[in-house]
Image: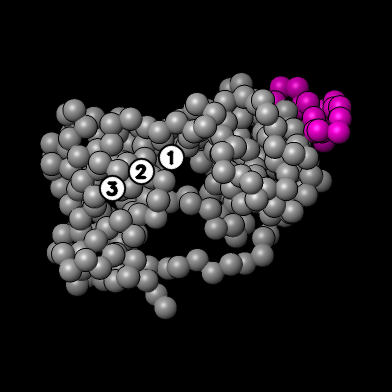
Amino acid sequence: MTDFTGNYSDQKITIDLKDLGSINYYFTKPEEYSKESIFLIMQNREIIGLGIGDLDNTEAATSYIEIVVPENFIVTDFFYFLTKHMVQSGYKINAEYKMQISQVSLQLYEKYWQNVLPILSAFGLRTTPVKRVKPRHKFMASLADVPFKIDYKGSKATVYWQKRSQFLVKSGAILVGQAPLTKSGVIGFAGRFGLRLRQEHEKELHDNVLTKDIVLRSVNEVGTFLYFAGTNGWLQLKSPSGQTLHELTVEK
């Protein structure tokens, strides 16, 4: 059992978990909040979005749950942990990024999550959402030698889908220079992850141009690395004949 204190108003309910941070439930979109807060954006009892210090484009939401994690947490790592948990629960959340989180941190995050989950459930979070069909894409060896082109928001690249989890980005690729800011003036998770990917490959980058071939693990990683995501990457990768990677590989 976890001890807590709390208060409420006609705008929100606050649960203070002391050393475990706090949780705020908002009946309407909050005007002020921390740029390091994690938000579960809700429509009725289901999550329709996740964000760090960002509530842009959430007009469809009916409520908001703000998680202020303990001070010893790395916010981006816990956010990634959370997205993976939501995917495992059945939510169709974009979580194809691959982050390395230490086993010690994973155990810490899991224990924390089990502590706060009853509170989130009391606030209406459905841990098993209504199932929706998400397009699935099938890797085909016949496409491994096809040079798919990307030309989006100033980024340009040639990419080969060599194996299911292996996307070769050719040298000479041009990357978008600056991570976009949300309306709140912060870098969102995709931007933070894109900067993290670029840091991992900083030896292969010079003035936002790729100087050596690199391998990434998913369409999402490719888009996040090149242009900080923000669009469906399957539609941005186009074959010499003009067909998108989505058109060529989607399972019907």
The label number, if any, that marks residue 224 in the structure image? 2
Mark 3 residue crowding within 10 angstroms, few (<14) / some (14–19) / many (20+): some
Residue 185 in the figure: left or right of residue 169: right
Q: Amino acid at mark 1?
A: Ala
Q: Which residue is mark 1?
A: 190
Mark 1 residue crowding within 10 angstroms, few (<14) / some (14–19) / many (20+): many
Residue 137 pos. (x, y %) = 37, 68
Mark 2 residue crowding within 10 angstroms, few (<14) / some (14–19) / many (20+): many
Residue 208 pos. (x, y %) = 21, 32
The answer to whether residue 118 is visible is no
Q: Amino acid at mark 2?
A: Thr
Q: Quadrant of the C terminus?
A: bottom left
Residue sitting at 58 percent across and 22 percent down? 72
Residue sitting at 18 percent across and 42 percent down? 173
Assess whether mark 1 and mark 2 are in contact (beta carbons under 8 angstroms). yes
Q: Which residues are magenta?
A: 1-21
Earlier sequence position, callout 2 versus callout 1:
1
Task: Please identify, in this view, whether the residue under mark 2 or under mark 3 is nearer the observer.
Answer: 3
Q: Which residue is mark 3?
A: 152
Q: Quadrant of the N terminus?
A: top right
Residue 121 in the figure: left or right of residue 236: right
Q: Amino acid at mark 3?
A: Tyr
